[in-house]
């Protein structure tokens, strides 16, 4: 492996100390608020998801340091990046929750990237001779701060990660900044943001939480699909690593976990109201989507052929049906009026 070790031994010592401090802080701060509020089960799902993302981002940062020190192979670094990305899928696209968590979304992931801004900014960043620290990275464009920036370093042919100690240190700084932001998200979920809502307000908030995330996931298909016969595969979320479809499957699994909320979520509420057929239809739709999801091809590759495009369209239609159930039928049943959200009109 053609990797240079970090040139200053003290840097490693300081970085290790910083990791230990972060771990100690996490142990103190990551405690879910316990309430008897109707939102508690959903809040608990979110708390666990945020804590998991915090853990995976921290592990990615530690692996990046080990990689720069020549202690692990690139394959391990890629594995840990995918683990962090998978954990992020549980929180991605949400427009409801603690403001301090939501405001980190762009810092964690810049998408859609319509003009390859990430590629251009990352080439400029890694061409610089400046030694970048996590605080320096936090002051830069969001395009070089998060998961997409690290994906570029791991998978783009323009990346010189494997041949430059300077670039490797830059990647480590990006991963540390990501870990810091993930910790902020996790800490923000230590309190239940919904404890002041009554049943009607909570129903509205809960449906919005699900539909916002579902709408965002559907955009991850519709943007690269674009017009029939004129797809834009480079608009796919993780086209460099060819992992867009696996990301979306994890979105679906995360939404199902929110919907069920350990037997105390929307599914249970519908069944308590006697809407068993609707509840079964939604549960069956989740199962259908998961069972038929293509796992052996990337979205980038699928969009290169007519058959692949039809496969993607079929999955999109299944998500659209799920959207109808939640956005329309559940909302009507609970008397909730759904307005425009952040993804409408894009």
Image (cartoon, grey):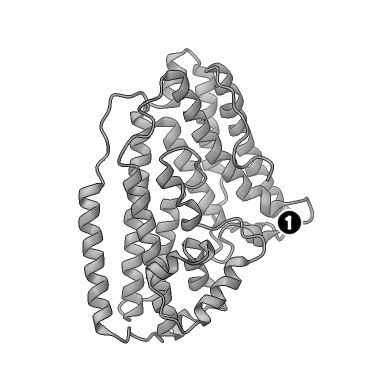
Task: Look at 25% across and 32% down and name the residue there.
Answer: 34
Residue 288 sits in quarter:
top right
Residue underneath mark 1: 231
Q: What number of labels is visible?
A: 1
Q: Is residue 77 visible?
A: no
| 255, 294: nearer the viewer | 255
Q: In this view, does 337 lie above or below 48?
A: above
Image: 38 above or below 345: above
Residue 171: % across, % down: 42, 73
Judge whether residue 105 can be spotted in this image. yes
Q: In this view, does 64 lie above or below 283?
A: below
Q: In this view, does 264 lie to the left or right of 326?
A: left
Q: How far across and down, in percent of the image, does residue 59 sit?
A: 32, 62
Q: Percent from the top left, x then y, of residue 325?
A: 59, 27
Left or right of 341 on screen, residue 227: right
Quadrant of the rendering where the N terminus is positioned: bottom left
The furthest residue to the right: 229
> Which residue is at the far top?
274
Residue 304 is drawn in which quadrant? bottom right
From the top left corner, tell me how far across and down residue 98 is, in percent: 40, 40
Determine whether 48 is above or below 112 in the image. Answer: above
Badge 1: residue crowd in 10 Å (few <14, some 14–19, many ≥20): some
Q: Quadrant of residue 321?
A: top right
Residue depicted at x 47% and y 84%: 129
Which element type, helix, strand or loop, lies under badge 1?
A: loop
Residue 210 appears left or right of 337: left
Taking depth in this image into account, of 240 and 212 the one nearest to the observer is 212
Q: Which of 243 and 192 is in front in this view?
A: 192
Q: Which residue is drawn at 28% across and 79% down?
A: 11
Residue depicted at 59% across the width and 41% down the height: 342
């Amino acid at each position: 492996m053609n990797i240079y070790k970090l040139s200053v031994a003290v840097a490693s010592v300081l970085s290790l100390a910083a990791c230990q401090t972060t771990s100690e802080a996490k142990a103190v701060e990551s405690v879910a608020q316990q309430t008897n509020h109707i939102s508690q089960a959903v809040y608990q799902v979110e708390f666990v998801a945020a804590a998991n993302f915090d853990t995976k981002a921290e592990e990615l940062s530690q692996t990046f340091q080990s990689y720069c020190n020549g202690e692990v192979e690139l394959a391990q670094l890629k594995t840990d990046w995918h683990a962090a990305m998978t954990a992020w899928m549980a929180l991605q696209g949400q427009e409801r929750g603690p403001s301090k968590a939501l405001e980190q979304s762009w810092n964690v992931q810049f998408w859609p990237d319509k003009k390859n801004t990430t590629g251009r900014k990352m080439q400029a960043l890694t061409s610089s001779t400046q030694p970048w620290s996590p605080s320096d990275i936090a002051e830069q464009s969001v395009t070089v701060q998060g998961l997409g920036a690290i994906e570029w370093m791991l998978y783009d042919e323009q990346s010189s990660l494997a041949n430059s100690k300077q670039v490797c240190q830059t990647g480590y700084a990006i991963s540390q900044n990501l870990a810091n932001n993930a910790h902020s998200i996790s800490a923000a979920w230590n309190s239940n943001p919904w404890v002041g809502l009554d049943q009607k307000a909570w129903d509205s908030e809960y449906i919005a939480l699900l539909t916002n995330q579902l709408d965002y996931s559907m955009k991850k298909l519709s943007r690269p699909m674009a017009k029939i016969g004129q797809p834009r595969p480079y608009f796919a979320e993780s086209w460099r690593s060819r992992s867009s479809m696996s990301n979306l499957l994890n979105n679906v699994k995360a939404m199902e976990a929110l919907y069920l909320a350990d037997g105390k979520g929307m599914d249970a509420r519908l069944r308590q109201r006697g809407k068993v057929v609707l509840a079964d239809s939604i549960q069956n739709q989740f199962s259908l989507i998961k069972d038929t999801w293509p796992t052996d091809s990337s979205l980038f590759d699928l969009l290169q052929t007519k058959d692949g495009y039809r496969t993607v369209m079929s999955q999109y239609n299944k998500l659209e049906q799920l959207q109808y159930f939640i956005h329309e039928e559940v909302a009507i049943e609970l008397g909730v009026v759904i307005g425009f959200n952040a993804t409408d009109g894009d």
